[in-house]
Image (cartoon, grey):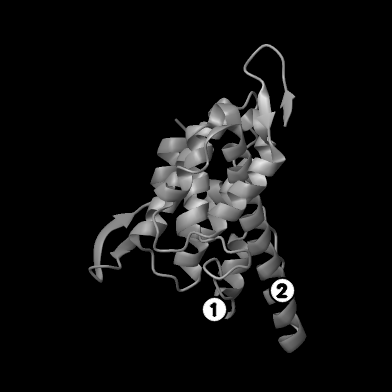
Amino acid sequence: MRWFGLGRRPVQHDPEQQHALIQQVRQVRFPERPEAVAALLAGDDGLVVAAGILREFADAANADLLAQAADLHRRGGRRLIVDRRNYRPLWEEAGEYLRWSLFTLPGGLHPYVQVAAAVTVVGAGARRSVRVSDPEALLAHLFEVLDLTVDGWQFGRLRADTDGAALAVGLITAARELRAAMAEPPPLPPPVRELMRSNATIDVLDPAADRIVGTFNPGREMRESLLA
């Protein structure tokens, strides 16, 4: 066990506890609710694991898109730019040829379970998160997952459902809280700025009832949360 920091409550790291937590979290399967996972991610070790979940998920999504782009180039000669700072140009150009694979990435992390739980934990513990992890990297991962979520709805033939809308709201809220806890938050990334200029709404499906139960306006949600 290691302790860091002076003055304020020191940062506590227990690598063995973190390893045990991530192994336990990986065993949870959808449709288990994210609250069950979030309850496991307590304290500084829980925040470190939550940040690690977001990093692993964002890295896996990027690796998947790089592999898809390489495959499209081999098969058809088409060169695609995969920029994890802004996936929207990629999805706008080639969405009909790409697979939205966030439900099937390696590692056993589900966007509506482990990722949603990590988002909740990071947002609720934002002031500690900036001390126990790299806040700029963590913020970038939140925005990457948000970008990919909305891209899937707009360009990837993915139906927005209630769990996906809840994830998007959680990502926006966590990003807001993390930025507020940072001394000098970085500028908002290009996909967020682009979406903020739009008032396009997306129908939200309740899978249990198999019907539309509302709409979600990503641009308005981002403006109200991130420009306040």
Q: Is residue 198 visible?
A: no
Asked whether residue 130 appears in the rendered view, the answer is yes
Q: Which residue is mark 2?
A: 67
Residue depicted at 50% across the width and 71% down the height: 156
- Number of on-image labels: 2
Q: Position of residue 78 (x, y in %)?
A: 72, 80
Residue 190 image offset from top left, x and y in percent: 61, 49
Q: Quadrant of the C terminus?
A: top left
The three-letter amino acid code for the residue at tag 2 is Ala
Q: Secondary structure at mark 1?
A: helix
Q: Is residue 11 above or below residue 166?
A: above
Q: Which residue is mark 1?
A: 96
Among the 4 quarters of the image, the one containing residue 14: top right
Quarter of the figure that contains the N terminus:
top right
At 73% from the left and 88% from the top, the residue drawn is 75
**Comparing labels 1 and 2, the label whose residue is closer to the camera:** 2
Query: Residue 132 location in percent, x, y?
Result: 66, 32
Q: Residue at x 51, y 61 (%)?
A: 110
Q: Position of residue 102 (x, y in %)?
A: 55, 66
In the image as oriented, which residue stretches furthest toward the bottom? 75
